[in-house]
Amino acid sequence: MSFSLYKRLTTTGTLSELEGVPDPRFALPSTINWMRSLVILCQEKEVNFDNARSFYNGVTKHSFNEHQENTVFEQLLFGLHQLSGLMALQSISNNADISRIGIVAWYYGIYHACSAMITAQSGTMQETHAGTAKAWDNQLSLRGLVMEPFALRVSSLVKTVYESEIAALKAGNDFVLTTRPTSADDAYGGCCSYLSGTAKWSKWNVEQEILGSKEFKALDVPDFRTKDARLLRDARLTGKTISFLHQAYRYRGKANYREAFFLGYGGARTEKLLSGYADDLGEVLAAFLSMAGAFCSKRLGKDLWASFIEDVEGSRAFSISATEVWK
């Protein structure tokens, strides 16, 4: 019998995936098509620095201490550096070579941009990815300070709640990410689909934590079928939300953990599917950084912002110019 890593991994599995890893025939298109959906919507909404400045017309300048100002600038610089690296990857001819590291660069660019916005909003800095995602949702997304297409969110991980909220967002749009989006309508449906998938994935993770908790073990039941078990579960799920940074964090896992297999396996078919993928990653990150920079420029004031841009232009060691994003 001939050796097939595809058959071995998808049917038998690994130590971390005992029932088999996800089938790349279905997982890979969804990965690519969410990013394509975001590109289409960023283009349709014209997410750039000028339009983001207009979006934040009501945002006022705030006085920060120098540590807080420096944190905003540091995080924006880190995000810009990730974008520069991602754009450099676009010149590599083999798309599969850069798919995994491209996702990682994209995620950290998003993460740094979110961190800058949080500090510019509240003067705080979170120490963990989960804490940053929660703060960004509470301080910015929940308050209407995030532009589309990055504004989609659900308020709870209780299944009946998030399914109802997503149904309202979709309004009958049943597009799913196994198909490549070609229109803004498709793209919006695809983003709703990814939000739904992230909520479901996050709910499962919380449930696994609950199953191992002392409180659950004290109930002496095997699952959540009893009333007391459901009450315990839903109390934990109620306070947990999902917004864009939560989705980006889940997306990063595709490169490093559970679904990494399909990004580098499958021969010519995989390479064809990944065509243009690095470009899409770069375009979405550039749009997100444009939004983040616009918000931060409003909070810090035009004089300090202009000094920051001038200094980055004179001192940067990476390729991309700050004015390419924040102009």
Image (cartoon, helix red, strand yellow):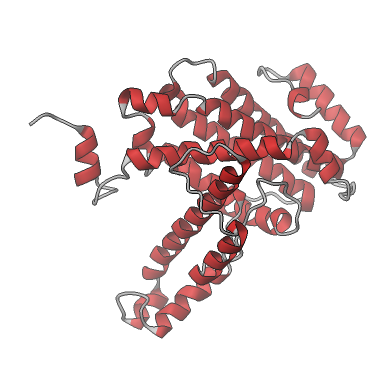
Of residue 298 and residue 214, the one placed in the foreground of this image is 298
> Measuring 42% from the left and 69% from the top, which residue is drawn there?
210
Left or right of 28, for residue 70: right
Residue 271 in view (yes/no):
yes
Q: Position of residue 88 (x, y in %)?
A: 57, 18
User: Can residue 288 be seen in this snapshot?
Assistant: no
Q: Is residue 150 left or right of residue 294?
A: left
Q: Residue at x 29, y 45 (%)?
A: 21
Instruction: Name the residue furthest bottom.
Output: 227
Q: Position of residue 221 (x, y in %)?
A: 31, 80
Q: Is residue 62 above or below residue 52?
A: below
Q: Is residue 126 left or right of residue 252?
A: right
User: In this rendering, is residue 137 above or below 163?
Assistant: above
x, y (%) of residue 254? Answer: 43, 41
The one of 66 and 54 positioned closer to us in this rendering: 54
- In this view, 152 is above or below 321: below
Image-based side of 296 in relation to 125, left or right: right
Q: Quadrant of the N terminus?
A: top left
Residue 320, above or below 115: above
Residue appearing at x 24%, y 35% in the figure: 6
Q: How many marks?
A: 0
Q: Which residue is farthest left?
A: 1
